[in-house]
Each structure stands twice: as structure tokens, then as C-alpha cells.
Image (tube, grey):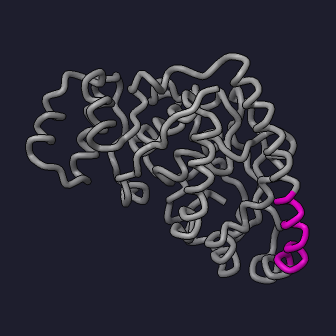
């Protein structure tokens, strides 16, 4: 059964809300250089380390050095390309699914208790649907409908998928919705997705279909994120956070691929223990609703 030591703490605070970060170019060498330049502009590094990484010859040299010195899990790291197998991993998946079902039932029971209070408050402040529903990409690249409590004023779909950090989306949040997002109560309906097997408690963050289609064109290996069920929480969510650019998506993808390669009870425990302080410290979380 695959396990892994806990990942190092994240250092990219502040990047995720910047909408003008560079887009990814074509080619692995060019992608690696673009990510390093973005990191270099945001981190205070000593000159010798900066020069050492500058002089790396491509991602084969730079990726492990960034992982060691900058605490960044890069998708070019070789240990993000190997997925666990064997009978022990099969048992782990069975136990994990049982836990998913138990926790999902508890979460839905909590939602049932809160809904008589929350539903009138939501509908009084913002007429429209009570629940937010949106197509996301899940296991084996199959699409499914993700459910949350609605926290934004309802709008007719125009076919445009916006990043989670886009100010045009965040401006639509109404006061009760702000409270629901800050407390993450709006996430409770996702336990239905977990119960029916479309999601898991832990896994890569599910993205909108148009965004996945675009990122799959520019990020090598992006499709490997869909080798497991998406999660309500995950290594990317607790270590990196939300992104609003192609470059941020590239770096955060490294955490998803690292989790897939090293998933096991130890890493799952680490993620669960870090989800609670992350929820308390994050406050309002962005999302396209």
C-alpha cells in the first residue's frame, strides 16, 4: 500500500488571485522556463540559489531542484508519473470507498438539518434556484453535475467558463452567500456526489469542462488528473489553493499528480488534518457559481 511522507508547506501565497500571470508556452523546456520566471518574480531568493536554478539545463535538472529548495511539487518530477498498483492498493480503495459513504451520509444529514433555515435566507436575498449545479470533469474524463448551495445571484448561462478568481464572478456573491462560502457550508451538497460515487472526500479539484479542454491542450499530462475521482478536499487544495491562470494550473497540477502517485492512508491523513486549519484560515473561497 503506497504511502508518502507529508509534502512540504506551500510557498506560493498570493499567486492564486493574480489574473495577469503568464500563459504557458508550447514545449516542455519553454513551460519549465516560464514557471521558473513566474516563481522567481514572486519569491525572495538568495543570489546563489537563483543563479543555480537559472543555470539548470531543462526540466530534468530544474524540477528536482525546485522541489528541494523551493518546496514546489512540479509535474516534471519523475515520482508524479507512477501510479500505485497491487492488492494492497485495491484494499485501500475499498476501505476508502466505505469511508466516503459513511462521511457522505453524515454530511447529508447535517445538510438536511440546516436546509429549512438556509433555504428561506438564500431565496429571500436572491430569487432563483436553491442549488448551484455545474458540469465538471471527473473519473476517466466523464462529466458529472456538481451540486452546491447557491451563493451568487443567478444568471443565465452564456457558455463562457470563468476562472474561480475572476472578479466578475465574485461580484455576484450576495451576503448570505458570503457567509456560506466563508464557513464552507455551501459545499455540503457535494456529499451527494460523493455518495453516488462521482466524487471522493479526497482527490484532485474538479474543473469546469471548457477549462479542462483548454488546459489539456497546453499542460502535458493534465489528463492524468482524471485517473482518480475528484475530491472535496485534496493535496492541491491544502498545499496550493485556488488558481486563475494557466501557469498557476500547471504548478497546482503537480500536487494532483503527486497525490495520485503517492496516495495512501498516511497522505490522506495529512490532507484531512490540514483541511480544517485551511478552511478556518481561507475564509471566502472562490468558485464559479
Q: From the viewer's perspective, is 77 left or right of 86?
A: left
Rendered-image quadrant of the N terminus: top right
Looking at the image, residue 90 sits to the left or right of residue 130; the answer is left
Q: Is residue 83 visible?
A: yes
Residue 222 position in % (x across, y down): 52, 29
Q: Residue at x 42, y 59 (%)?
A: 17
Rendering coords of residue 103 (x, y %)? 81, 53
For this rendering, which residue is in front, 245 or 240? 240
Residue 160 visible here: no
Quarter of the image for the C terminus: give it. Answer: bottom right
Name which residue lies at 58% across and 36% down. 212
Please say if 9 is above or below 140: below
* Left or right: where 54 falls relative to 43: left
| Residue stretch in magenta | 106-119
Q: Position of residue 147 (x, y in %)?
A: 78, 54
Q: Is residue 18 above or below residue 170?
A: above
**Camera-side residue of 83 and 15:** 83
Quarter of the image for residue 138 reads top right
Q: Main secondary structure of the magenta part?
A: helix
User: Is 153 situated left or right of 110 in this image?
Assistant: left
Q: Residue at x 53, y 65 (%)?
A: 168
Choose top left, top right, bottom left or bottom right for residue 22.
Answer: top left
Q: How many marks?
A: 0
Q: Residue at x 76, y 49 (%)?
A: 146
Report if residue 118 lies within the magenta region. yes
Q: From this view, report whether residue 232 is shown above or below residue 246.
A: below
Q: Residue 92: x and y, percent?
A: 73, 31
**Which residue sits furthest top?**
86
Residue 108 magenta-highlighted = yes
Amino acid at each position: 500500500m503506497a504511502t508518502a511522507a507529508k509534502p512540504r508547506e506551500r510557498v506560493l501565497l498570493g499567486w492564486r488571485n493574480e489574473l495577469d500571470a503568464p500563459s504557458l508556452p508550447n514545449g516542455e523546456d519553454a513551460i519549465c522556463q516560464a514557471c521558473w520566471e513566474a516563481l522567481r518574480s514572486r519569491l525572495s531568493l538568495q543570489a546563489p540559489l537563483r543563479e543555480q536554478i537559472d543555470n539548470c539545463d531543462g526540466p530534468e535538472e530544474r524540477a528536482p531542484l525546485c522541489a528541494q529548495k523551493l518546496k514546489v511539487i512540479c509535474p516534471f518530477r519523475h515520482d508524479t508519473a507512477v501510479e500505485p498498483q497491487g492488492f494492497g492498493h485495491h484494499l485501500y480503495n475499498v476501505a476508502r470507498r466505505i469511508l466516503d459513504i459513511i462521511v457522505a451520509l453524515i454530511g447529508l444529514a447535517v445538510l438536511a438539518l440546516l436546509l429549512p433555515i438556509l433555504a428561506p435566507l438564500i431565496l429571500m436575498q436572491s430569487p432563483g434556484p436553491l442549488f448551484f449545479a455545474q458540469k465538471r470533469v471527473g473519473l476517466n474524463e466523464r462529466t458529472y453535475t456538481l451540486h452546491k448551495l447557491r451563493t451568487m445571484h443567478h444568471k443565465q448561462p452564456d457558455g463562457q467558463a470563468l476562472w474561480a478568481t475572476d472578479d466578475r464572478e465574485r461580484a455576484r456573491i450576495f451576503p448570505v452567500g458570503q457567509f456560506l462560502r466563508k464557513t464552507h457550508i455551501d459545499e455540503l451538497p457535494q456529499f451527494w456526489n460523493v455518495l453516488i460515487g462521482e466524487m471522493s472526500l479526497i482527490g484532485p479539484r474538479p474543473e469546469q469542462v471548457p477549462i479542462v479542454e483548454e488546459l489539456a491542450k497546453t499542460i502535458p499530462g493534465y489528463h492524468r488528473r482524471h485517473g482518480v475521482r475528484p475530491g472535496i478536499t485534496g493535496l492541491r487544495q491544502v498545499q496550493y489553493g485556488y488558481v486563475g491562470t494557466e501557469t498557476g494550473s500547471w504548478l497546482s497540477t503537480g500536487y494532483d499528480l503527486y497525490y495520485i502517485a503517492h496516495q495512501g492512508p498516511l497522505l490522506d491523513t495529512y490532507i484531512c488534518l490540514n483541511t480544517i486549519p485551511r478552511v478556518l484560515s481561507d475564509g471566502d473561497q472562490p468558485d464559479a457559481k
